[in-house]
Amino acid sequence: MKQPSNEIVSLTRKIFSNMSYQLVLGGLGGIFSVVHSGLLSRYLGVSGFGAFSVILAHVLLFYGFTNWGADTIAIQKMSQKKGQEKEWFVGLITLRVALAMLSYLGCLVFLPLARYSAELNRQIVIFATVILFAPFEGLLAVYQTYLRTGVPVLVSLTVQGLTVLGTLAAIRCRASLTILVAIAAFGTAARSLFLSVRLREFLILPCRYSWTIWRRLIVEGFPIAAASVCSMMVGRFSIFIVSHYHGTQAVGLFAAPFRLIFFLMFIPQAVMVPAFPLLCRYQDTDSAHRNALFHRSHNALLWGAIPLGIVCFILAEPIMRLAFGAAFLPAVNTFRILTLTLMLVFISLTAGYLMVAAGRQRTSFVYNVWASLIGVLLMILLVPKWSTLGAAWGLVATQFLLAVLTFQYLPKLGIRLEGRPIGLGLFSGGLMAFIMNMIGPAHWLASLIAGVLVYVGTLTGLLGGFHRQGFAAVISREFGA
């Protein structure tokens, strides 16, 4: 059997270690985030949690403009153009500083137009300070390029833990919503600052500033920025339109399941964040390794999306009760609908990253615009009557259309989806759903354990079982070496 090269072994070990860091530490971070939201929801109540969500939605809408897609372009160029990493890094950070200043001013200027209460305006101004720390998030591009994503995940986990402790202490002191907003702002800003600690040796190295790099980041990043803004605005628009027609009480019932779905997004990101630089590297040099990496990543996310979606759908009531309390049980059906969005993100994210790696940002932008417009139109039609359910279906429609458009483009990149992994996953998921329904959500823990065991056992058996073999053999098989 042909032995894999040392480069493939080294890269694969880095991928596996980074994915492990992302999954384990990201999972703990997701738990901290759910705990933080659970503390706030129980303390503030449905209406108070809705007000907190409006604050986040307003600020994070402008926070998204601080990226401009420059991070993705910088990772792409630093992965492909060895020896120019520092020039691209300096261009990225300086551009993000300028964007952060403009976004912060835009956030404040827009406040009078939103017609919030004076207290809500004050709380938004406090939380908006996180925008000024956004340029430090550009440091993630360096960690990602060099496949050291465990470092930022560990930093994020530490800050999230401290934020939870600070929130718990504030609640015990019966603090106001303003204090809780300030704690959340401090946690977000601290995470950005701590990312720079491990990069001092990188920053002191000499490098040349180039206006050409700035221009390329702006021009090439624009389609990514526009696509991200479209996706982001659909999510934020859902909060604003629910608030407009049904008030902060309805926002609280929508924001709770929405945040829960958002927290679970760390799983597909854990797979694609370390894989993306290699997709860029192999794009023009080794299509066989690129295709193998795409199929392995896609199958892993597909086989993860099916059981996760089934668990969230069947056990929606105990999950909402455990995470947010009994007051949020009216949001159970909204959570079930949003679970479809989560599954669609899982199975389509790999294709989206591949399009960017192949330089198809403009096409991706057009797809995002169409999908976002359909989602917004559905929300305008459905939310006045159906409230949070209408907003949830609008998000599902957006992600569904985006997935369809993205998948139909894959043959142009030399990729054809395999039918067998999809069939195996659906068959295993069907047995899992049957067993979980038989046990019922009343015995949620037994239902969860039995369902997972059935799914894993069935899928493993259909794949031929696990065989003991050397690491080199696994590498050789996975990467086609």
Image (cartoon, grey):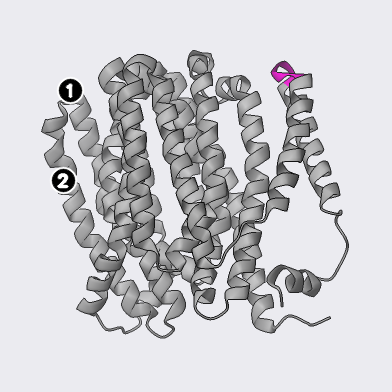
Label 2: which secondary element: helix
Quarter in which the N terminus is drawn: bottom right
Left of 52 or right of it: where is 466?
right
Quick one: 206 or 47, which is closer to the camera? 47
- Is 18 drawn above or below residue 28 in the view shown? below
Mark 2 crowd level (few <14, some 14–19, many ≥20, 10 Å Cα)? some
Residue stretch rendered in magenta on the structure: 439-443
Viewer can see residue 56: no
Viewer can see residue 217: yes
Residue type for callout 1: Ser
Quick one: 40 or 393, which is closer to the camera? 393
Q: Which residue is mark 1?
A: 117
Residue 353: percent from left, percent from top: 48, 59
Residue type for callout 2: Gly
Residue 19: percent from left, percent from top: 61, 58
Q: Which residue is mark 2?
A: 106
- Is 217 drawn above or below residue 190 in the view shown? below
